[in-house]
Amino acid sequence: MPEWNTGELIAADKRFVWHPFTDMREWCAPEHERLVLVEGRGALLRDSNGREYIDGNSSIWTNIHGHNHPHINAAIRRQLSRVAHTSFLGCMNPAAIEFAQAIVALFPDTPLTKVFFSDDGSTGIEVAIRVADQYWRLRRSRRYQFIAFRSGYHGDTAGAASLGAASMFQTRSSRWNFPAIQVSDFNTLSALTPAEIAKIAAVVIEPPIQGAAGMRVWTSGTLRAVRDWCSRTDTL
């Protein structure tokens, strides 16, 4: 195992790095112990001092197959031997095409026939609401507002944050935010008037649990009720 100079790494981190979702004043306090993670295998992570930790949240929900998975590592090495990255702007590559085809095949007999690749949940939501907005614009519709459920979390990019946790990120600029209506539950959603519904572009919800607001589980049937409401009102 390589020898890591934890002190030097922490000093450089404090000088050069700004961490997301982190109180930087607390992070840089002398008494705060920082974890320098250097290795992982399976569900375990190891820090620069050799201590091990269970990665209980899959590195913030992004590593569900575990660290150093041999199948994934082998696939990455095969791709690296060809090319590490190519732009998708006006270009294509075999891996992305084959992956998109496989995804579409999971949804036979549905209108889901195109794949837009994004690299994290926040930008996935950001793209989805932009596509929804463009969809209604192309149909020359007045639908421009979004419905989100109170205390929901949908990401930290500007548009995604505006749907729920905008106050957490202090994103109050109307230049970035999509207009969103907060509802507390399905009853509130179903009470919207026809005039209000006529302005709704899409409904956004965390299924089946709101994870960032205290682990709030939806009651049985909520998602089906929301889906049926969207179908009845021609809402995305």
Image (spheres, helix red, strand yellow):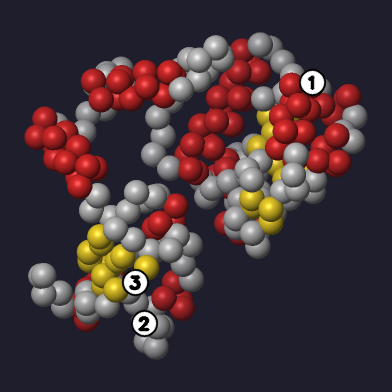
> In this image, 39 relative to 218: left or right?
left
Q: Residues within 10 Å of mark 3 (few under 14, many from 20)?
A: few
Residue 206: x %, y % from top left: 63, 44
Of badges 3 and 1, nearer the viewer stands: 3
Q: Residue at x 22, y 28 (%)?
A: 86
Which residue corresponds to mark 3?
Answer: 53
Work out whether 25 lies above or below 190. below
Q: Marks 2 and 3, Cα distance to the nearest angstrom?
A: 15 Å
In the picture, residue 98 is in which quadrant? top left
- Residue contact between numbered discs 3 and 1, judged by CB atoms under 8 Å: no
Under tag 3, what secondary structure? Answer: strand
Q: Quadrant of residue 87?
A: top left
What amino acid is labelled 2 in the image?
Glu
**Residue 208 % position (x, y):** 64, 45
Mark 2, residue position: 33
Q: Which residue is mark 1?
A: 232
Q: Quadrant of residue 31?
A: bottom left
Give the structural element (helix, strand or loop) at label 1: helix
Q: Is residue 168 visible to us here?
A: yes
Sequence-earlier tag: 2 or 1: 2
Q: Tally the numbered discs.
A: 3
Q: Which mark is residue 219?
A: none
Which secondary structure lies at badge 2? loop
Three-letter code for the amino acid on which mark 1 is drawn: Arg
